[in-house]
Amino acid sequence: MDDLLGEDFGLAESHKLYRCLDKLLAHKTALFSYLQTRWQELFSARFDVLLYDLTSTYFESDPPAEGKRRYGYSRDKRPDCVQVVIALIVTPDGFPMAYEVLPGNTSDRTTLEDFLGKIEAQYGKANRVWVMDRGIPTEESLAKMRQTESPVHYLVGTPKGRLSKLEKRFLGMSWEQVRESVDVKLLDADGELYILARSQGRVQKERAMRQRRLKKLWKRLHELQRQKLTRDQLLLKLGAAKKEAGRAYGLVTITLPDKDQPVNAQTFKFVLNKKKFRQVHRREGHYLLRSNLSGENQATLWEYYIQLTEIEQAFKELKSDLSIRPIYHQRDDRIEAHIFVAFLAYCIQVTLKQRLRALAPGLTPRAVLEKFSVMQMIDVHLPTTDGRQLILSRYTEPDKDQQLLLQQLKLKLPLQPPPKIRSANSV
């Protein structure tokens, strides 16, 4: 925000800006509807598939006595800072339909029902498909989506633990290829469609990660066997090793010494849990999805799910290119205004991205903005003989590369602004 306002932006101007933003925020819902209409006109955008996810952004400020800033699960790896949660709905092309700023301790599982109601109230009932990660819906919310008069369709990731209940039924089924290196199996069970997907690229990646972590953990356990430690010291070091090893730690069965025993190779033992290892090996690179979409083919369902990367990209752009964090504001209305500005900037960025896809494939919004960033708008002040000032606002003329880019994007710069006269006693 400070970069946007500039060094000369004073306190009075800042208050004026925030008062203006407060008025705009009152029309946030109307803005969502306007943007949807414009994107349909400009790009024939579709809004029948919605991607829903949440992120958090932290604050460089003291913990509050009240308000939305709260400690919670930090996606920024900053559990030491208070935060707010941002819920966002975008289309597979990245067009945002709505967002909401929630308290920092909000649980993902408590947000879906309200958003379903808001989207339906604003845009009406429609044949939409909600695509979400596994941590968002509860069993109750999915049941409500299935049981409504006009069922709300969903496709959601499912924890691999659920695969244990269905694994035997999947074993007798054959794989069907939906795209290069991706195979799926479909299973109707309990009124839902389960999709087991296997990505060869993901298989190799997960196995390489698991092997690297398991090898490092194994080496560390051997080191601990040789160290002269008390049982309590060993437990502390094992806690650190568990955190670093992640899920690989669960593949090892560890026998600890009794309370009064020394730590050595006889009292502190560890072996590979072969049953768990075989199970993890078999499931690596597999995704279990569930849906109430019975009419779609497996290729379409898989395409829906992998489009969740688009909302991850939206969060990445908000936090990197658009610099939404860190936030220093402490009042909720100022926090809302800060995030609102970042949201508007993202809307402009995604609009530019879509325009580039059609007119200049291969170029990114960042590359285009960097190219145009050297163009400046300046005010030239010229004194007159009667004590007044002639003010000429001028932008620098584009160079050849910029002219070519403007032509490619079918953009035309406005005429240079007309001169203005300022009296000697004006502020």
Image (cartoon, rainbow, N blue to C red):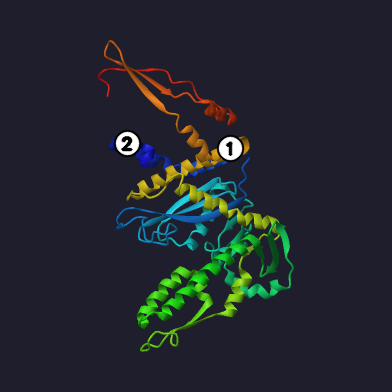
Q: Residue furthest top?
A: 385
Q: Residue furthest front?
A: 226
Secondary structure under the numbered disc 1 in the rendered image = helix
| Residue 226 x/y as whole percent | 41, 80
| Residue at mark 1 | 356
Examine the image and state in which quarter residue 384 appears: top left
Q: Is residue 310 above or below residue 198?
A: above
Q: How many numbered marks are there?
A: 2
Secondary structure under the numbered disc 2 in the rendered image = loop
The type of residue carrying mark 1 is Leu
| Residue 340 x/y as whole percent | 43, 44
Label 1: few (<14), some (14–19) or many (≥20) C-alpha neighbours in 10 Å: some
Label 2: few (<14), some (14–19) or many (≥20) C-alpha neighbours in 10 Å: few
**Residue beneath the point at 49% across and 50% down:** 316
Examine the image and state in which quarter residue 171 appears: bottom right
**Along the viewing direction, whichever of 306 and 99 lies nearer the viewer:** 306
**Residue beneath the point at 58% across and 62% down:** 205
Q: Quadrant of the C terminus?
A: top left
Q: Residue furthest left?
A: 425
Q: CA distance from mark 1 to mark 2?
A: 32 Å
Q: Quadrant of the N terminus?
A: top left
**Residue beneath the point at 59% across and 46% down:** 93
| Residue at mark 2 | 7
Q: Is residue 121 above or below residue 42?
A: below
Whether residues under marks 1 and 2 lie with C-beta atoms below 8 angstroms apart, the answer is: no
| Residue 295 x/y as whole percent | 71, 58
Q: Is any atom of residue 147 visible in this view?
A: no
Q: Is any atom of residue 164 visible in this view?
A: yes
| Residue 29 x/y as whole percent | 49, 45
Q: In the rendered view, does 23 fall on the left or right side of 291?
A: left
The type of residue carrying mark 2 is Glu
Between disc 1 and disc 2, whose residue precedes? Answer: 2
